[in-house]
Image: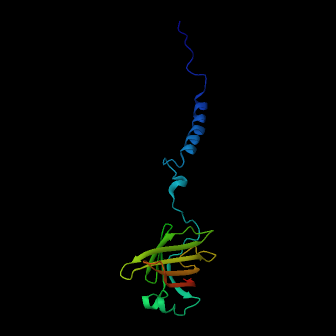
Amino acid sequence: MHVESPRSARSPKAVTFLRIPVLLAVGMMTMGSGMGNPGCGSGVPECEEGCAIAGTYTLQFADSSPPGAGCEALGFGLPQGPLVLTLSDSYVTAKFGDETLSTYYEGEPSRALDFSTAQYLTEKNVRRTVLIDSTVAAPSPRSATDRSVIEGEYDLEILSSEDNRVKCHIKRNFTATR
């Protein structure tokens, strides 16, 4: 025995209204899955506010005295010339003396701009480490014409790669102004 029922007692309007919540629910569940919104897993911080830090900065050290005989004998001293920053999205490249360094910059509210690099100089049998811990002073620049100040600490350490003995250490506070 076959019993036939009417196709649907629901109105077409009800079906249309149900589609929207279902589509929204599916969209919310797939965020971060690679199906649309990249979500939290991209790993690269994004700069959203106060990001206009690119430019040439005049560099001034709080203590500009010579670094010492050990550093001078190895040919190391305070960086000369300006600090030059370039920014691509949130990736910052800095030309600081003879160093080219890079990092990410998130802008407001942290304003942290910290660089580090290390390399072995085989011809001198030493390892050179450069750390720059700095902060873009508030308010961070919103445009390329806004004044920008970076304050921080420059730390250069030259270690013997044979016995890990410090051959040169320069640690100075600086201010860079654009």
Front residue of 73 and 65: 73
Residue 65 higher or lower than 133, as above or below? below
Compared with 88, 58 (above or below) is: below
Question: From where the camera sits, is residue 111 visible?
Answer: yes
Of 136 and 63, the residue lying toward us: 63
Q: Residue at x 53, y 75 (%)?
A: 53
Above or below for 33 versus 22:
below
- The way the protein has been coloured in the rendering is rainbow
Residue 92 visible in the snapshot: no
Q: Position of residue 150 (x, y in %)?
A: 57, 79
174 sits to left or right of 165: right
Q: Which residue extends farthest left?
A: 123
The number of callouts visible is 0
The foreground one among 94 and 161 is: 161
- Furthest-top residue in view? 1
Which quadrant is home to the C terminus?
Answer: bottom right
Q: Position of residue 123 (x, y in %)?
A: 35, 81
Query: Residue drawn at (56%, 43%), measured in percent from left and top?
Result: 29
Could you say where residue 37 lies in the image, as x and y percent from the top left? 52, 51
The quadrant holding residue 108 is: bottom right
Residue visible at 60% across and 74% down in the picture: 140
Give the image location of residue 41, x and y in percent: 52, 54
> In the picture, residue 19 is in which quadrant?
top right
Q: Nearer the viewer, residue 163 or 134?
A: 163
